[in-house]
Amino acid sequence: MAEPKPKIRIYTDGGAKPNPGRGGWGAVFVNEKRKIVRELQGGEDETTNNRMELTAAIVALESLEEPHEVALHTDSKYLQNGITQWLAGWRKRGWLTSGKQPVQNRDLWERLDAALATHDITWSWVRGHSGNRFNERADRLATAGRRTATRAAAKQVQQSERSEQGVDLVHLFAAGTCNAQTGEGGWGAVLRLGQHKKLFQERVTETSANRMQIAAVVEGLRKLKRPSAVAIYTPSDYVRDGATKWIAGWRERNWRTKDKKPVEHRDLWEELDRLCTEHGVQWIPLGGEVPPELAEARAAARGEGSA
């Protein structure tokens, strides 16, 4: 008579921000006494919510060194439905959906399918952010995994002197600031190419913090004498999101928001749009770390640097 398999309860979570974008996953292993006995986490540079949910379950199951009786808890309907409703049909149809379309994320579903043969698994859906402490812990691990991937990617680009296309890479560190009471502000920009670095700055009256953040990037790009590959570092989510998520829609709507209101700082956004077209730019997430050149740009924006 075969010995019973050891039992383990696993809670998994994954996500990407934005989706698609940089992602992370986490897995929490809980024993029969409801004690956390192991945790795993990781991240990827360019991925999706669904791929991270799948990866969390796959890596958790693959990490078990012997067959287990597993109770796997996920807050992903995509993962649960894929396992309990869709997987068998996909496999029979040669990894095509019922509509005869290729199954998305097939590589991961095949890995997960192989892991299923090793263990006895029951799948349960748990509502995310509903107070389940193990699910909440898996969510925190996934967030930590995404941040680790963000920091690693940013550091890799910051240390690179060549773009993916093999041309010299210019690093632009840009920051702006404003005193909300007086309306006095400024911007600072550091351009670095290899070992060569130059600082630019300006103080401005009657302005705003958002305007100075945009101006820092615009003025930094204006200093480039020829079209270049540029890695841009800014502490402003407003600028980064505007340039990567919103600007195309604004342009299509003749520089109006979805609510049909005029876009604030249109003059700067239009110029940034033009400059980003002229240069090959990539926006680098900071991941909680401040490069020294960005600290210089911030000091310059406050009027503390020297041009």
Image (tube, rainbow, N blue to C red):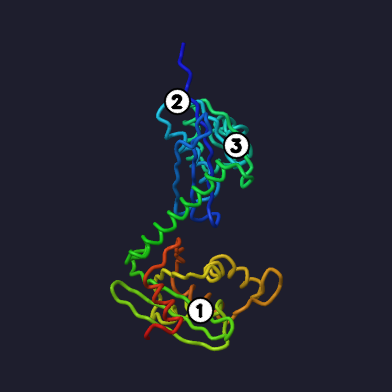
Task: Identify the residue at image location x=59%, y=83%.
Answer: 181
Q: Secondary structure at mark 3?
A: helix
Quarter-of-image position of residue 132:
top right
The residue most toward the bottom is 205
Of labels 2 and 1, earlier in sequence is 2
Query: Badge 1, how many Cα within 10 Å: few under 14, some, many 20+?
Result: many
For disc 2, the marked residue is 67
Q: Secondary structure at mark 2?
A: loop
Q: Nearer the viewer, mark 2 or mark 3?
A: 2
Distance (Cα) linking label 2 and label 1: 57 Å
Q: Nearer the viewer, residue 258 or 66?
A: 66
Q: Position of residue 105 (x, y in %)?
A: 52, 43
Distance (Cα) linking label 1 and label 3: 47 Å
- The disc placed on residue 80 is 3
Q: Nearer the viewer, residue 216 or 301?
A: 301
Q: Position of residue 187 (x, y in %)?
A: 47, 81
> Looking at the picture, which amino acid does disc 2 mark?
Pro
The residue most toward the top is 1
Q: Mark 1 and 3 residues: CB-CB less than 8 Å, in contact?
A: no
Task: Identify the residue at image location x=37%, y=76%.
Answer: 191
Distance (Cα) linking label 2 and label 3: 21 Å
Quarter-of-image position of residue 154:
bottom left
Q: Is residue 136 above or below residue 185?
A: above
Of labels 1 and 3, earlier in sequence is 3
Query: Badge 3, how many Cα within 10 Å: few under 14, some, many 20+?
Result: some
For disc 1, the marked residue is 177
> Looking at the picture, which amino acid does disc 1 mark?
Thr
Q: Nearer the viewer, mark 1 or mark 3?
A: 1
Q: Mark 2 and 3 residues: CB-CB less than 8 Å, in contact?
A: no
